Image: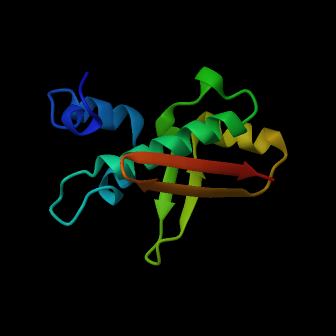
Amino acid sequence: MATVAESLSGPHRAHYLERIYTPGEVEDCSGPSGRVEPERLAARFAVKEAAIKALPGAGEEVRLTQIETLRDESGNVSLALSGRAAELFAESGASEIAISLTHEGGFAAAVVAMT
C-alpha cells in the first residue's frame, strides 16, 4: 500500500488533487519549494470530512471541492462553502462556522462546529 506522499508523486496525482481540493487549497499546502506537503493536505481532508458530518443531509450530495479551507496571512483558518454545501448550510439555520485543524507526526485532525 502506497503512502500519501508516494500517491502524490504518482501518475494520478493531478486527478486526485483536482477531485478533492480547490486550487487555493493546493497552493496553500505547497511548501517553499513548491512541493505539496501531504500532512497539510490531510488536515484539509479532515476538515472536509468533519464539515460533511456537520452539514445535515450532506452525504453524497456535496462534492469535496465545495468545502474549502482558507488561511489568511496571520494563519487563521476559515471555511468557505459553495454549491450544494452552501445550500445545505443555509437550510440548516446555522449562521456561523468555526473550524480547527492540526497536523503533526503523520497525523491530521479537524473539528467543524456550525451554530
Q: Residue furthest bottom?
A: 74
Residue at 21%, 27% (x, y): give it: 12
Residue 114 x %, y %: 75, 50
Look at the picture and state if 76 lies above or below 59. below
Residue 22 x %, y %: 40, 45
Task: Give the left or right position of residue 108, taking residue 57 as reference.
Answer: left
Q: State the residue in front, 76 or 80.
A: 76
Look at the picture and state if 6 lies above or below 61. below
Q: Residue furthest right?
A: 93
Task: Give the left or right position of residue 60, taking residue 38 as reference.
Answer: right
Task: Give the left or right position of residue 34, taking residue 4 as reference.
Answer: left
**How many badges with numbers are in the image?**
0
Residue 112 x %, y %: 66, 49
Residue at 18%, 58% (x, y): give it: 34
Q: Is residue 22 visible?
A: no
Q: Is residue 28 visible?
A: yes
Residue 105 x %, y %: 37, 52
Question: Which image quarter is the N terminus in?
Answer: top left
- Quadrant housing residue 97: bottom right
Residue at 18%, 53% (x, y): give it: 35
Look at the picture and state if 67 lies above or below 31. above
Residue at 76%, 32% (x, y): give it: 56
